[in-house]
Amino acid sequence: MFTAGAFLLSAALVVNGGFEDDIKGWNFDRKNFEVVSGAGISGSRGFVWTNSNPSKLVIARRKLELEPGRAYRFECWVKNDGLVNAKTKPGDKPTVVSIELYDDKGKFICMTGARAVVDNQKSEAGWTRYRGTTPITPSNLGEALFLFYAAKGTTGTQVLDCVEVTALKEVPIASVFSSAYRDTAYTGKVSFAAKCVLNPCRYSLSSVKAFFRFAGVDGAMMVPVEINGNGYVRTEVDVSDLARGTHGVEIVLKRGDGSLIASRKMDFTRVDRRPSRKVDFDKYGRAIVDGRAFFPIGLYSSRSMVERLDIYCQGPFNCILPYGLSPDYRELDPYHAKGIKVIVSVHTDYIDYIARKGAKITTREDEHAFAERYLKAIKDHPALLAWYIADELPPDKIENLRERNLLFRAGDPDHPTLAVFDRVDSPADFIEGYDIVAMDPYPIGNAGGRASIANASIYPEAARAGMWDFRMLWQVPQTFDWTWYRPWAAKDHGARMPTFEEMRNMNWQAVASGANGLIGWWFAGIVKHLEGKGKTQEFNKVWEDVKKAYAEVAEKTPLLLSVEQAPRVSKLPPDISARTWRKDGILWLLAVNRTYKPVSGVIALSDGSTVDVSLEGLGVVFTKIQERGSQRKDSAASM
């Protein structure tokens, strides 16, 4: 993956992006498109899309000359001149701007969509800037197309202008990171890894020499490493071999003749004893809060919901993530009085992305100033659990998040940073930007591949693989109804509030997949959209279901926090997630059906034993496994 902070190299990859040369290079249906003088920005020529048939999908395409092994940023300006789509809610934009990639045999590779840019830049009335960034193009790239259209069902008119596609500077080393919490350790072994992104058209992996350079007790240490097929290098070092204090750890890439390709550093600190932190993490991924193991169970909320804290505390929750808190120490006092830990939201105010109303965020200094206000005001509050610094950031914010994470690390050694993503590749891409990662698959009432309830385990499993278990893993389970945000989704995708059985299943899927904390979305929505609209009976039913679903997990936390050695799950049936623990010498197995249909199969453990499981649709089993040696063969059924 590339870093978003790379310099732009070329701005001429789309000729006639302003349409001053009529329609040269564009492929479209003349019945629906035309270039019109005066329709563009500042009275220039614009590319006008018109459609009166909601069942017709009308697309304009422009072939791009992209190079293999490069990443590209693309942007344009679009004016919505009366688009109508019955399937979108007010404020949604049916405009689609994207780049599609095909291989040299014409097979589709991927599509990257642009997003509407939210910023404080002045623009002409009605015009919105769209921006996107492609992944690194593969070595077998055949064709690349720029597409402009509107979602099916859309009628009306929109205008396109100022199309630009720019190549990003090659960054041969995208990230370097360690398995130690906050890159600090006092004993044991620490793994170091780096993501290498080499242009396959310029470098052959077999000819590249890679090594890590460490500051050792007796001087510099050079450790050769091999670049694997995914571009990663990894090594393990005993902390006792490293010099005390903070030193740079460097990954170096060289050509076969010894000349330098690239290098990248990270800081690592060896200390003499375990750091004393208010919130820490151990090697098992458990949060240690005020010296005790802690399994976070909570919900997102909002600043205004502090008035409903008594209702919230009826549930099994030990923490909360309220949107909209101001940098005011006293705002955390009500939560502290109730014994509720607070994850403070500072996920807004990135350049071109999620700025608070009235905020002026145009430089990195503005981003830093926003975060520093919260640091100075809140970091010493006893209710503070973590800093929520990212919410589904797009790939072009990798460097922004890295800088914010470093700022919080330097300014507050006591509390971790949390980033939440909805793309399975994001945990790997943003690896330098967080201490804890949480995925937020919201399948019930979602569309396409996102509609599978199995995503409640597929997403965290992908996150663990992408970050190599080097970071802590929590999860954001769906605890809301998509129709609150997409009124049309009830008809199109069966959107509704998840049932108790679904919420319970999604919670346990996450735990079975390695999550050591659950922060569901969202309490404020339940209150606003049900109780707040006079649906008292429905609110009471939903709230009881939510409390019950999370209470099941809360009741098991003494077991979930146990670190007694237990055999791991080594092989699973395809539709089952599972995890083991041992407490007080007793081995426990959690198994979860990721489907609505009954499933059965054999779960193999790392000690060679097996367990037969039989689960009803959405079934969950938490059961003791009898110890009978490596030939043990037990059975378990749904609770």
Image: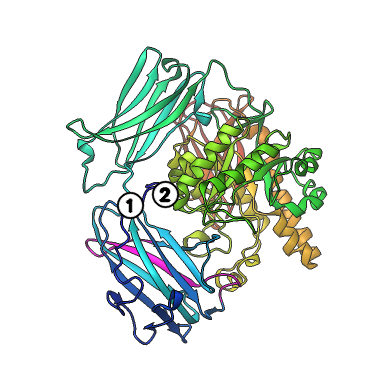
Q: Are marks 1 and 2 in contact (CB under 8 Å)?
A: no
Residue at the farthest top position:
218
Residues rendered magenta in the picture: 87-111
For this view, does 630 lie left or right of residue 486? left
In front: 636, or 606? 606
Residue appearing at x 37%, y 22% in the figure: 214
Q: Secondary structure at mark 2?
A: loop
Residue appearing at x 65%, y 55% in the figure: 479
| Other-residue count near label 1 (Cα within 10 Å), few / some / many at <14 / 14–19 / ≥20 | some
For this view, does 54 lie left or right of residue 198? right
Residue appearing at x 40%, y 77% in the figure: 44
Q: Is residue 462 visible?
A: no
On the image, the x and y values in percent for residue 504 come to 64, 50
Q: Which residue is mark 1?
A: 136
In front: 583, or 250? 250
Q: Vertically, is 512 above or below 73? A: above
| For marks 1 and 2 on the same chain, the one whose residue lies earlier in the sequence | 2
Residue 4 circle label: 2
Amino acid marked by disc 1: Ile
Find the distance from the CA under tag 1 to the CA under tag 2.
12 Å
Q: Is residue 51 magenta?
A: no
| Other-residue count near label 2 (Cα within 10 Å), few / some / many at <14 / 14–19 / ≥20 | many
On the image, the x and y values in percent for residue 406 come to 52, 36
On the image, the x and y values in percent for residue 64 come to 28, 65
Residue appearing at x 43%, y 77% in the figure: 40
Q: Nearer the viewer, mark 1 or mark 2?
A: 2
Amino acid marked by disc 2: Ala
